[in-house]
Amino acid sequence: MKYKNDLILRAANGETTERTPVWLMRQAGRILPEYRAVRGRLSGFKELATTPALAAEVTIQPVDILGVDAAIIFSDILVVPEAMGLTYEMYESKGPVFPKVISSEKDIDSLKIKEAVEDLEYVYEAIRLAKKELAGRVPLIGFAGAPWTILAYMIEGSGSKTFAKAKKFLYAEPILAHKLLQKITDTTILYLKEQQKNGADILQLFDSWAGILAPEVYKEFSLRYITQICNSITEAPLTVFAKGAFFAREEMGKLNCRTIGLDWNMGIRESRMLIGPTKTLQGNLDPCVLYAPLSEIKRQTISMLNEFGKVNHIANLGHGVYPDTKVDHVKCFINTVKEYTFNPEQ
Ligand code: CP3
């Protein structure tokens, strides 16, 4: 496939680029009035995510409106537990809720793997449609949740400040936890491969709840499975974003993946030292900086770019963009990256 703009692919592959590529986690969503207009005509988030033509439409919106260097397929990490057998509801104010959760070995045994991957055909169709509409303007990112983060929702049944129930499961039922994590891992590998076959150019794993585990527990119950995924995904460059896992950066440097995502608590120079020189780093402006006046957004973005340096960096926020962020503030971040020329003295 020939791209008009393949900056992100080249940066992900460790090649030198004319400028740093930029996109935003959660760029396809509520920050855009055009997204809210599509969403407002429907029964809810799930209808949008499961209707390929509409999912493809909102995938492309940030490319047209914001000018980002990549599209990310409009979906959710929770489509995987749903396809494995646990349906979820998405409530506007509360977030996701799973009416049925995993509470026994029998529940784990009844989860599907191969059929789950087949049931996600609507995601593959959305990818094919988005790819066609993009017509090579920018590459398309596919994604999945990391096994620990998916387990956390499967056990807890909803979002939580502490995910204490999910953590309790790791400590009280480690054998069952490993059994469940392995099933999620097997499904995720097949799912990511299928996304790549249908047109995803880069794949990203979101370990959103990495930071709530103690370092040794994180190694045993999360990194072990992320390692399996990294070793199995050879078809496309993979990004691992483990929010809050500052303590695991050295180990993440050894993963068989191309890019490591940083959140805003991870110092840039320190991360580079811990992770090593060869991986591409992605991130890491605090999403709250986008609430600041435009001059401050510009200043902080330039300072971030200076610290990362001009190679092996994909500019992004340190987590998803918050829904009440103003579009012109998001554009200021994107345009600052695009106009930047490297000057370490700045
Ligand atoms: O990045 C993108 O633009 C692509 C779309 C995308 C969504 N969710 C759409 C979405 C992606 C990459 C995700 C990932 C996701 N989903 C994560 C990992 C990233 C992270 O933020 O840590 C997690 C933990 C989820 C689970 C999830 N989905 C929660 C907790 C919620 C409720 C909170 C919220 O943000 O509303 C969602 C809902 C969701 N996923 C929305 C969107 C656009 C909002 C729902 C709506 O439009 O009504």
Image (cartoon, rainbow, N blue to C red):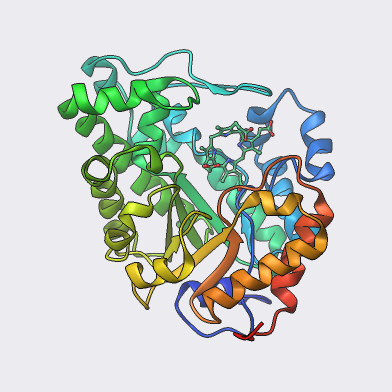
Q: Say left or right for 28 vs 327.
A: left
Q: Residue 145 appears in which quarter of the rendering?
A: top left
Which of the image's four quarters has the C terminus? bottom right
Question: Is residue 136 at least partly visible in the picture?
Answer: no
Front in this rendered view, residue 123 or 292: 292
Q: Residue 328 appears in which quarter of the rendering?
A: bottom right
In the displayed structure, 5 sits above or below 235; it is below
- In x, y percent, where is residue 127? 59, 51
| Labels in figure, total | 0
Q: Residue 40 appears in which quarter of the rendering?
A: top right
Q: Quadrant of ligand 1?
A: top right
Residue for point 55% across, 69% down: 314
- In x, y percent, where is residue 268? 48, 67
In the displayed structure, 8 sits above or below 165; it is below
Q: Say left or right for 14 vs 172.
A: right
Residue for point 47% across, 59% down: 261
- In x, y percent, where is residue 66? 77, 60
Front in this rendered view, residue 266 or 229: 266
Q: Say left or right for 197 vs 291.
A: left
- In x, y percent, where is residue 149? 40, 37
Residue for point 43% across, 21% down: 86
Q: Say left or right for 25 vs 334.
A: left
Question: Is residue 187 at least partly visible in the picture?
Answer: yes
